[in-house]
């Protein structure tokens, strides 16, 4: 399912116009993104938890040249599914 299909599904299930459903989906995604940017986890009980995981700097190599290099520390968004979601897809 892509974003357009998600908006269509939300519009149908919530009896909204596609424009309003698109605004709602965008608002939810923006809110999740902003919370993660601030470093706050987003917990949707039963569905799952969005959070940011810090990745430390580590040694690596350039696959093209084989030269050793340092991979910088970074932050990555992660999602951990909740029990209800896990049970739903079994």
Image (spheres, rainbow, N blue to C red):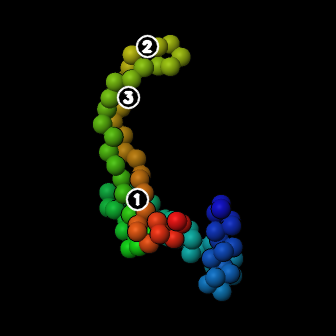
Quadrant of the image occupied by residue 61: top left
Could you tell whether 20 is left or right of 39 in the image?
A: right
In the depicted view, which residue is nearer to us: 15 or 84?
A: 84
> Rounded to the nearest whole Å, what is the CA distance between mark 1 and mark 3?
25 Å
Helix, strand or loop at disc 1? strand
Q: Nearer the viewer, mark 1 or mark 3?
A: 1
Q: Position of residue 16 (x, y in %)?
A: 65, 84
- 34 or 64, which lies in front? 64
| Tag 3 secondary structure | strand
Q: CA distance from mark 1 to mark 2?
A: 35 Å
Q: Describe the element under mark 2 as helix, strand or loop.
A: loop
Would residue 35 be visible to someone looking at this image?
no
Q: Pointer 3: residues within 10 angstroms few (<14), some, or many (20+)?
A: some
Q: Identify the residue at horizontal 57%, vertical 71% (top origin).
A: 25
Q: Mark 1 touching mark 3, by CB under 8 A?
A: no
**Where does the image place residue 7, in percent across and percent down from the top left?**
65, 71
User: Which residue position is annotated with label 3?
Assistant: 71
Pinpoint residue 4: horizontal percent, then vertical percent. Answer: 68, 65
Q: Residue at x 40, y 67 (%)?
A: 82
Query: Which residue shows up at 47% across the image and 69% down it?
Result: 87
**Between discs 1 and 3, the one toward the N terminus:** 3
x 54%, y 66%: residue: 89
Q: Which mark is residue 67?
A: 2
Residue 63 to residue 35: above or below = above
Q: The N terminus lies in which quarter of the figure?
A: bottom right
Image-based side of 70 in relation to 12, left or right? left
Q: Identify the disc placed on residue 43.
A: none
Going from N to C along the chain, the mark reached first, 1 or 2, is: 2
| Mark-to-mark CA distance, 3 and 2 | 12 Å
Give me the disc on residue 80: 1
Residue 10 seen in the figure: yes
Q: Residues within 10 Å of mark 2 (few under 14, many from 20)?
A: few
């Amino acid at each position: 399912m892509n974003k357009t299909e998600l908006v269509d599904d939300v519009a149908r299930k919530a009896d909204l116009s596609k424009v309003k459903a698109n605004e709602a989906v965008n608002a939810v995604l923006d809110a999740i993104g902003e919370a993660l940017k601030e470093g706050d986890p987003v917990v949707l009980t039963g569905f799952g938890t969005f959070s940011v995981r810090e990745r430390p700097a580590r040694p690596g190599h350039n696959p093209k040249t084989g030269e050793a290099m340092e991979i910088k520390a970074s932050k990555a968004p992660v999602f951990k599914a909740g029990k209800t979601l896990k049970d739903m897809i079994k």
